[in-house]
Image (cartoon, rainbow, N blue to C red):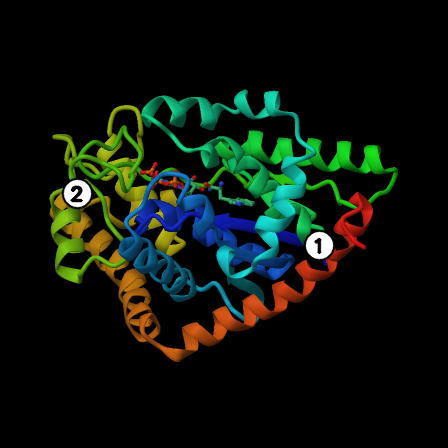
């Protein structure tokens, strides 16, 4: 079975867009891969974070993923900072990566401009990411547009290390390009993607929103004056966005949805969309509530930590030997 690994940044509550566009795919991958999922809390501190908020965001994200159907029996789930070998391997890789390659990373160029007096970790960020990937002999890393360059750097680091030391020590990871998932638009401005950093929260459904808020947001979604439930993203972006949401969550095809609501007004259609979103998110919220302060969550994280410590220790000891750090 091929090994899949991905890191998630603890950035607070996720949106319905994240669920439809990303988490649903991960739930599918867990059937096909030996899957490693970790919370990249060490990457999160490359930009200053409030410690209490960081602690909460990390736990929250684990609980949300589990509540969404990431199965701890099919995935190894752990927190990056609980495995000391990531930073240790990263240091050795830092000493084997040309400085010039780091300054060319697009994310570094963007973020170093946005943050005055940025820290050195922002520059070395992709090397820690390469360590995350290479420690586990990862076959595939799912890549979004923004992280593709970092996975390519991890490949370069693996290849040049193997060449320098004359061994196939690091497996060269392949980027896994996810199938083009549905893009969910903002409810108020459906031409923009639904995003947790949107200016107006009324256009964004968060996975932990209350039923009342979900209904209010969907009933307030932007539509048009045609009064016809028809999929036409160019001329009817609001209704088309609601059709996409309904399609993704109910499994009905777009055609079946148009047929089902051909005589309905927008109020009736929106109520049906809201029912469908509530039916999906209510159990997720309930499961999250059960997990967030539970021992079960800690047990899952302890098991992930112990398993990955064992794998990573072995790889690190071999790595030290190769570079001459062992007596
Ligand atoms: P930010 O507001 O910080 O940009 P975001 O909510 O837009 O965050 P990302 O962290 O950029 O989300 O993306 C995480 C994953 O969720 C990616 O795989 C991305 O494709 C997916 N995703 C995010 N928003 C949507 C959306 N509106 N529709 C479909 N998929 C989405
Ligand atoms: N940089 C990634 C998170 C991340 C990651 C990884 C993803 C850290 N290490 C290793 C894949 C593999 C992000 O910001 N999404």
Give the labeled residue for mark 2. Answer: 201
Tag on residue 81?
none
Task: Report helix, strand or loop for mark 1.
Answer: helix
> Mark 2 near ligand 1 (CB under 8 Å)?
no
Tag on residue 316?
1
Query: Is label 1 or label 2 in front?
Result: 1
Q: In the rendered view, does 176 fall on the left or right side of 198?
A: right
**Whether residue 204 is situated above or below residue 73 in the rendered picture:** above
Task: Report helix, strand or loop for mark 2.
Answer: helix
Label 2 Cα neighbours within 10 Å, binned few <14 / some 14-19 / many ≥20: some
Please name the residue shown 17% across and 61% down the image.
211
Q: Residue furthest front?
A: 327
In this view, the residue in front, 277 or 6, is: 6
Q: In the rendered view, does 202 fall on the left or right side of 40?
A: left
Residue 84: x percent and y percent? Answer: 57, 57
Q: Quadrant of the N terminus?
A: bottom right
Please name the residue shown 58% across and 67% down the image.
74
Residue 63: x percent and y percent? Answer: 37, 65
In this view, the residue in front, 323 or 230, is: 323
Please name the residue shown 36% across and 48% down the image.
247
Residue 55: x percent and y percent? Answer: 33, 59
Q: Quadrant of the C terminus?
A: bottom right
Residue 29: x percent and y percent? Answer: 57, 55
Please name the residue shown 42% across and 47% down the image.
9
- In terms of image quadrants, where is residue 294? bottom left
């Amino acid at each position: 079975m091929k090994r899949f690994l991905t890191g998630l940044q603890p950035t607070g509550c996720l949106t319905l867009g994240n669920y439809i566009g990303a988490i649903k795919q991960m739930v599918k991958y867990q059937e096909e891969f030996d899957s490693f999922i970790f919370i990249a809390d060490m990457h999160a501190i490359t930009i200053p974070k409030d410690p209490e908020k960081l602690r909460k965001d990390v736990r929250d994200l684990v609980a949300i993923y589990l509540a969404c159907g990431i199965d701890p029996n099919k995935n190894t789930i752990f927190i990056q900072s609980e495995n000391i070998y990531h930073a240790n391997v990263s240091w050795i890789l830092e000493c084997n990566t040309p400085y010039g390659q780091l300054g060319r990373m697009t994310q570094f160029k963007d973020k170093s401009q946005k943050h005055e007096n940025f820290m050195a970790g922002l520059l070395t960020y992709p090397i820690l990411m390469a360590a995350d990937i290479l420690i586990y002999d990862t076959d595939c890393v799912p890549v979004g547009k923004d992280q593709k360059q970092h996975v390519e750097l991890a490949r370069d680091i693996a290849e040049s290390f193997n060449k320098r030391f004359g061994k196939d020590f690091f497996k060269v990871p392949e980027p896994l390009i996810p199938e083009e998932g549905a893009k969910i638009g903002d409810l108020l401005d459906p031409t923009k993607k639904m995003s947790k950093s949107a200016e107006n929260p009324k256009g964004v459904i968060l996975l932990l929103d209350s039923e009342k808020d979900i209904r209010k947001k969907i009933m307030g979604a932007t539509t048009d004056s045609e009064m016809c439930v028809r999929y036409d993203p160019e001329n009817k972006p609001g209704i088309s966005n609601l059709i996409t949401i309904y399609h993704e969550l109910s499994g009905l095809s777009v055609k079946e949805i148009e047929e089902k609501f051909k005589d309905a007004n927008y109020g009736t259609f929106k109520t049906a969309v809201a029912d469908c979103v509530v039916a999906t998110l209510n159990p997720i919220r309930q499961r999250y509530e059960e997990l967030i302060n539970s021992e079960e969550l800690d047990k899952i994280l302890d098991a992930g930590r112990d398993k990955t410590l064992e794998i990573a220790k072995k790889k690190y000891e071999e790595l030290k030997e190769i570079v001459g750090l062992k007596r």
